[in-house]
Amino acid sequence: MAKTKSDEEFTFVSPGVKYLLFFFNVIFWVIALILISIGVYSRIVKHETALACLTVDPALLLMIVGILMFFITFCGCVGSLRENICLLQTFCIILTIIFLLQLVAGILGFLFSDEARGKVTEMVDNAIQHYRDDLDLQNLIDYGQKQFNCCGGISYMDWSQNMYFNCSKENPSRERCSVPFSCCLLSKEETVVNTMCGHGVQNLEYLAASAFINTNGCIDKVVNWVHSNLFLLGGITLGLAIPQLVGILLSQILINQIQDQITLQNYNQKHRLDPWS
């Protein structure tokens, strides 16, 4: 019995799923390129070539995240367009691993909150020590301290860990015993920021210093903000999880469709060669 034209043209692979996954990955592929470009530009502007620690170089963190996203979305783009099972499986597996790692990190952070807080404190202390070493890090810390009206990790005295703000007598810096201007209390009437407003405040008692700067640490302020904005953070978490789950689902559907199509092609090829089998 002769096969009809519709039999020959039938395919299990849905064009809708195929191109939806393709354009889904193109969007994040473009975002990855933007992140890499920003990271590279930032390091070029700072004339830096040596690798630094992730916690003290936001530009390097952007580059690593961008490169990882670029590789993952490349597998998704090419895999869906070329109907390549190997690339699609790579895309699906990596995305699943990342999703599970985020889930495990969230659960562990909730169950072991004290240990997580200690680790965050270490990262903040490390960032304070390198405050003057990286302009991006400096701007990030200043932005955080101004947004949360805080100073240092636990308290404003944490700034003594920085070699420029250290209160030791051996410190020749003009910023000795000071804190960054982003710790200062600024009135709405002030139009010009006095960058030396935190000069010598580490020599003052807590109550006396509170008249000039925010004395509370940023970690407690951030924790309180998190507790007050759980619904917002839940929405952001869900917004990050949904694209990952959509990518995993679409890639797995397409993989199954391609495998069914390969089975059909093998069946047709076998019966074309041996019509009596």
Image: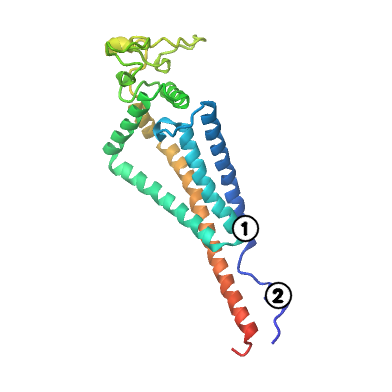
Give, as a three-letter code, the residue at label 2.
Ser
Task: Say which quarter of the image contains residue 96.
Answer: bottom left
Q: Which mark is residue 189?
A: none
* Label 2 or label 1, whichever comes before in sequence order: 2
**Label 1, on which residue?**
81
- Is the image coloured rainbow, by chain, by secondary structure, or in one colour? rainbow
- Is residue 91 depicted above or below 206 in this figure? below
Mark toward the viewer: 2 or 1: 1
On screen, residue 82 above or below 68: below
Residue 221 appears in which quarter of the rendering? Answer: top left
* Residue at the extreme bottom of the image, as rendered: 276
Res 81 → quadrant: bottom right
Amino acid beneath label 1: Leu
Query: Where is the N terminus found, in terms of image quarters?
Result: bottom right
User: Residue at point 34% right, 16% down?
Assistant: 165
Quadrant location of the C terminus in the rendered image: bottom right
**Crowd rating for badge 1 (residues with CA inside 10 Å; few <14, some 14–19, many 20+):** some
Q: Please tell me whether mark 2 sits on a helix, a strand or a loop.
A: helix
**CA separation in Å, label 2 and label 1:** 23 Å
The residue pinned by badge 2 equals 6
Residue situated furthest front in the rendering: 49
Q: Residue 247's x, y, as percent?
A: 52, 53
Q: Is residue 6 left or right of residue 66?
A: right
